[in-house]
Amino acid sequence: MDGIHGKVAIVTGASTLIGAAVAAAFHRYGAKVILADIDEARGREAASALGEGATFVRTDITKDEEIQSCVQRAIELYGGVDFLVNLACSYIDDGIQASRSDWHASYDVNVVGAVMMTKACLPQMAGREGAAIVNFSSISARVAQTGRWLYPVTKAAVAQLTRNMAMDLAPEGIRVNSVSPGWTWSRVMDELTQGDRAKTDRVAAPFHLLRRTGDPEEVGEAVVFLCSRHASFITGADLPVDGGYSAMGPEQAEAAIPRLCE
Ligand SMILES: NC(=O)c1ccc[n+]([C@@H]2O[C@H](COP(=O)([O-])OP(=O)(O)OC[C@H]3O[C@@H](n4cnc5c(N)ncnc54)[C@H](O)[C@@H]3O)[C@@H](O)[C@H]2O)c1
């Protein structure tokens, strides 16, 4: 992938499967990577699995001083910031039962955290050739899902934020896009199924055209593509990495008409 080698990427939320795979993809294409997360144990493990050119920096994206020290570490270790991936998320969501503080906590991580990371990286990224930001939205941003209000709403906000950021950062030479993954093999799915990928794929099949969950690596490749030279005229866009989930409406990946004859 052109335009990645020798660059520096910060990936928030890089401690678990998807974030670690995004960090690994940048590393594989020759970038230096800062893995920024509050989960120290997993984050250090993910960074040391990559080896030289990857560093874990404990960063709580709801704390401005920790954000500043994360960016500072990127400068000290690797000489600046070319790419920012706002991937860290909160899944806190009790639907209508959620309290005001739950809403604030969700927005603080999923939306405000991404904005503050962007603000802190901006002086480093402005004018750097090929600078790019990738935000994490979701398939959940566009559909109603039972019992979920906070997560989908914040993810929809991220999609809109991406367009606003793309508009205002274009003069600085920074492209801004988002990805919207479908069901991806991730920490949550691993925990919910006790590691049963086959079962997860079976459940996902009717609402993903490719009839399976995505691999974290497939999301990583899409993120690196959006940062690469191959995406040099793409900004303000949302890229579904969802195995065809968003190509369907209420129809599922199963024939509906024959059911009329059952
Ligand atoms: N799992 C899926 O199928 C799926 C589908 C669509 C979109 N996504 C998106 O992909 C991204 C990763 O999702 P995941 O399922 O791997 O989530 P996850 O919960 O496994 O990972 C999120 C990471 O963010 C970190 N984090 C939480 N709060 C933080 C804070 N205040 N500061 C720094 N880090 C913090 C966590 O420690 C964790 O490592 C998210 O943006 C999510 O919305 C996931």
Image (cartoon, rainbow, N blue to C red):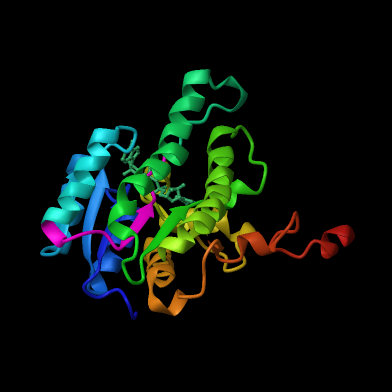
Q: Quadrant of the C terminus?
A: bottom right
Q: Is residue 206 visible?
A: no
The picture quadrant where one finds residue 10 is bottom left
Q: Say left or right for 260 vs 173.
A: right
Name the residue located 59 percent from the left edge and 45 percent from the top edge.
156
Residue 148, position in %: x, y?
59, 34
Residue 129, position in %: x, y?
33, 71
Q: Is residue 97 above or below residue 141?
A: above
Magenta-tinted stretch: 77-90
Does residue 95 show up magenta in the picture? no
Name the residue located 22 percent from the left edge and 60 percent from the top edge.
33
Total number of numbered discs in the rendering: 0
The picture quadrant where one finds residue 224 is bottom left
Q: Say left or right for 3 vs 202.
A: left
- Residues 239 and 171: in front is 171
- Residues 191 and 1: in front is 1
Does residue 80 show up magenta in the picture? yes
Name the residue located 14 percent from the left edge and 64 percent from the top edge.
53
Residue 32, position in %: x, y?
20, 64
- Residues 35 and 185: in front is 35
- Residues 61 and 242: in front is 61
Q: Say left or right for 117 vs 182.
A: left
Q: Is residue 103 above or below residue 141?
A: above
Name the residue located 58 percent from the left edge and 47 percent from the top edge.
140
Q: Ligand 1 is found in which quarter of the picture? A: top left
Q: Quadrant of the N terminus?
A: bottom left
Q: Is residue 187 above or below residue 180?
A: above
Q: Is residue 106 visible?
A: yes
